[in-house]
Image: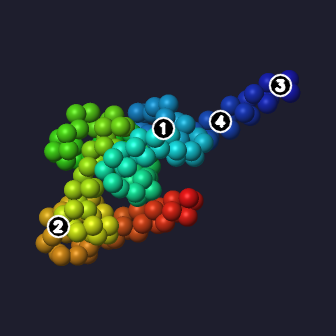
Amino acid sequence: MKVMRRRIIFSLCALLYCIPFFMLCKGSCSISSWWIYLTGDTTYYDPHIQSISREYGLDPRLVKALIRAESRFDHEALSSRGAIGLMQLMPATAKDMGVKDPYDPRENIEGGVRYLKYLLKRFNNDVTLALAAYNAGPETVRRYGCVPPFNETKEYLKKVLDFYSQYKQET
């Protein structure tokens, strides 16, 4: 009888623990998404992040911070605006960056890093402006000549830069 009660309690606890994840993933759950959600281990994609970032001369910690802010490391993420994957590439941007399958983690990271590198070049290696352009679009940043006065963009910048700072302190 005690064993049966323990199993029931364990099953209920496991179910309650997983409900938020089911709500976040909206039915498109993968093993990697489960692993990251259950363990909090965000190093799952580190090999891709490290190699691709170094290939393009970017700080892997910045790329990881961007991924965390964009998709919370969910390679199947799809925004309400149509942005796809870990780095939340818009379909047109993915195509411009040579990404054939934006749900493939490695391709998505490479396309996102390539795009971030382009934005950094366009905005004279100003990380703040490049990140603002990643969020609001490069033409919007060019038009304003600075970070656009949108709350969403300001909050996004704060989030990415806070994550970046955390990752820098860890190493």
Which circle, 4 or 2, is nearer the viewer? 2
Residue appearing at x 21%, y 67% in the figure: 123
Q: Is residue 152 above or below residue 58?
A: below
In the displayed structure, does residue 61 sit left or right of residue 99? right
> Where is mark 4, residue-wise?
14
Residue appearing at x 68%, y 38% in the figure: 13
Q: CA distance from mark 1 to mark 2?
A: 33 Å
Query: Which callout, 3 or 1, points at the residue further toward the start of the chain?
Result: 3
| Residue 152 in the image, given as x and y percentages of width and height | 32, 66
Which circle, 2 or 3, is nearer the viewer? 2
Residues at marks 3 and 1 touching, judged by CB atoms closer than 8 Å? no
> Where is mark 3, residue-wise?
3
> Where is mark 2, residue-wise?
140
Q: Is residue 155 above or below residue 102?
A: below
Callout 4 secondary element: helix
Q: Quadrant of the C terminus?
A: bottom right
Query: Which callout, 4 or 2, points at the residue further toward the start of the chain?
Result: 4
Callout 3 secondary element: helix
Does residue 159 show up? no
